[in-house]
Amino acid sequence: MVECRPNLSLFVSGILASGEVMVKALVCRGPHTVVALVAVLAGLLLAGAGTARAASLVVDVETGQVISADAANHLWYPASLTKMMTVYVALSEIEAGRLSFDDKIKVSAHAAGQSPVKFGLRTGQTITVREAINATIVASANDAAVALAEKLSGSEEAFAERMTAMARDLGMARTVFRNASGLPHDG
């Protein structure tokens, strides 16, 4: 049973190993998180328009009832859905008062060197947390996601460990993050 009462009656999620828990947690966070999450998912769905869907999950957020599930517990590479957790961690830090939308991020060479989807950030460039979140959500920008991760945890590797720990806290026992963008990871 979902304990919050969001304005949405249904929420559609893509490929998530333990999607029901993630959806409940994100919807209960508040309107900014819901807007961010819907924007990410809409972008991902539109980007893949015309392609076959491998997995889906539809949850009634009023009752928590799973309405439809197709391969919802199959293990998948999360790809750009990883950015949803990247933004979730950032919004959690903002909500806790440890981060501000106006805080500055200095872009590292590692962040600027990400591919293939980029916002075009340059090494040494300074952007705000808000700009990094927006680029991550709207443009699915890997460079912005990595810059945000480095701001929050010092390194992308440390941030991936943090996302995995947060996934455990949300009940996603089989989810493991390797980076902030969802790009395939060697090793």
Image: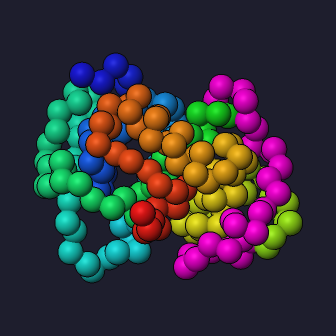
Q: Is residue 184 left or right of residue 13?
A: right
Q: Is residue 159 left or right of residue 131?
A: left
Which residue occupies 76% across, 38% down?
Answer: 100
- The span picked out in magenta is 95-121
9 in magenta: no
103 in magenta: yes
Depth check: 95 or 164 in front?
164
Above or below for 25 versus 39: above
Mark yes or no: residue 10 visible: no
Q: In x, y percent, where is residue 152?
A: 68, 43
Which residue occupies 52% across, 61% down?
Answer: 181
Depth check: 85 or 43 in front?
85
Quadrant occupied by the C terminus:
bottom left
Q: In x, y percent, where is residue 171?
A: 32, 31
Above or below for 79 versus 72: below
Above or below for 19 versus 116: above
Above or below for 117 versus 21: below
Quadrant occupied by the N terminus:
top left
**Main secondary-structure element of the magenta-colored stretch:** loop
Q: In x, y percent, where is residue 30?
A: 51, 32
Which residue occupies 26% across, 78% down?
Answer: 51
Q: In x, y percent, where is residue 126?
A: 85, 60
Mark yes or no: residue 118 visible: yes
